[in-house]
Amino acid sequence: MHNLRHYIYDWLVEKGIAEHIAKYLNMFILLIGVLLIALLVDFVTKRLLWKFSSSLAKRTKTNFDDILIQNKLPRNIAHIIPLIILIEFVPDVFSDFPYVENIIEKSLKVIAILLTLRIIRSFFYSVRDYLKTLPKYKDKPLYSYIQVVMIFLWVLAIFAIFAIITGISFIQFFAGIGTASAIIILVFKDTILGFVASIQVTVNDMVRIGDWITFEKYGADGDVTEITLATVKVQNWDKTITTIPTYALISDSFKNWRGMMNSGGRRIKRSVIIKTSTIKFLTDDDIERFKKIELVSNYINQASETIKKHNMERGIDKSVLINGRNLTNFGVFRKYLQTYMDNHSAINKSMTLMVRQLEPTPQGIPMEIYAFSSDIRWQNYEYIMGDIFDHVLASVKFFDLEIYELAVATTD
């Protein structure tokens, strides 16, 4: 290259071109030549690497090499040889222009650093995409760890670039940065907090990709789609996206529904308020009428016989209904609902199942159904719960009970 540079320059001078013009023409001709060679080498190298990697990917059983190609790792590597050519020969092109040569040389070194980062990023992204295909790592926040490593590498790269531009050695420049550590910590505060939070989230297994979480503070209610160093993305049920700071997962309270999803049952906890004035002891006529209700027929037969025997043995005066032991329409209704839930096909019988009476309120006495549906899918869960309480509301009147309804006064 050195001989060629002088040959072109001497040839131009021989042709009668002024020396200062010959320098510029010489530089321009050499620059065009080097750039054309670099572009040609880049094109050939990319083609060769692409054919080699594609052929290798077809022969191997693993899909990792396919992912490497998708993330353009071979293409990025192909840029190395043309860059080496430029670093080797471009300074000679500008040897007659020391100031420009210095700028070009530094620029090529900066480009080399950036290309190295690009190659490393492509490799890390390929590893991430490959691990996501494995069940063991599918729900892990891999992107957070890649971001941590990339931030560290970017910091080193920025230090190296500044060292190249200023002409100070990397070690001296890095040592000088220590005095500005307080400013660096302030600038990267969210990143540091996010890094610490992502480690705690992973170690404690607080959130995984695909978990359904509810975070009222940020209005999030949906599936976690992405966990990064700084943010957690949640796709809400209305298809909107909520972005939550990663460190908020350890500093604030949120609800993760994973336990419910893994349990095989989704809780039903809802009550109806029964008017206290409609609760009564059952007369013999009431008992005979309620015996026709299939789900409580056996219960009423057994209970009424037991109660009658108890009252007779103790000589209870039953001319007054309150004396002795008695059945109530409220108690029979509770038993009816318990039997109804026990026989419901959509209820998980291996989990807690009960119908209970809650503490009386000024409006009446709440009768609560506490159970778990066997289908945890939201739409099906709502249908099951609606079906149950449709039946509850319709069956109340058969037991001479009424549900409390707030009467709203109207004015003309």
Image (cartoon, rainbow, N blue to C red):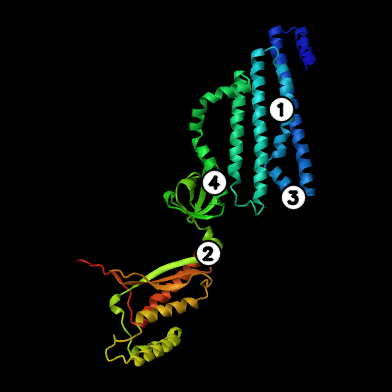
What's the CA distance linking mark 3 and mark 4? 32 Å
Q: Which mark is residue 200?
A: 4
Dot 4 surroundings within 10 Å: few (below 14), some, or many (20 or more)? some
Q: Which mark is residue 83?
A: 1
The mark that comes first in sequence, 1 or 3, is 3
Dot 2 surroundings within 10 Å: few (below 14), some, or many (20 or more)? few
What's the CA distance linking mark 2 and mark 3? 35 Å
Could one spot residue 212 in this view of the protein? Answer: yes
Where is 264 relative to 164, above or below? below
Dot 2 falls on a residue whose secondary structure is: loop
What's the CA distance linking mark 2 and mark 1? 56 Å
Q: Amino acid at mark 1?
A: Leu
Q: Amino acid at mark 3?
A: Thr
Residue 302 lies in quadrant = bottom left
What's the CA distance linking mark 4 and mark 2? 30 Å
| Near-viewer residue (265 or 128) | 265
The mark closer to the camera, 2 or 1, is 2
Dot 3 falls on a residue whose secondary structure is: loop
| Quadrant containing the C terminus in the rendered view | bottom left
Q: Which mark is residue 377?
A: 2
Dot 4 falls on a residue whose secondary structure is: helix
Q: Which mark is residue 62?
A: 3
Q: Position of residue 246 (x, y in %)?
A: 51, 44
The mark that comes first in sequence, 4 or 2, is 4
Q: Which mark is residue 321?
A: none
Could one spot residue 243 in this view of the protein? Answer: no
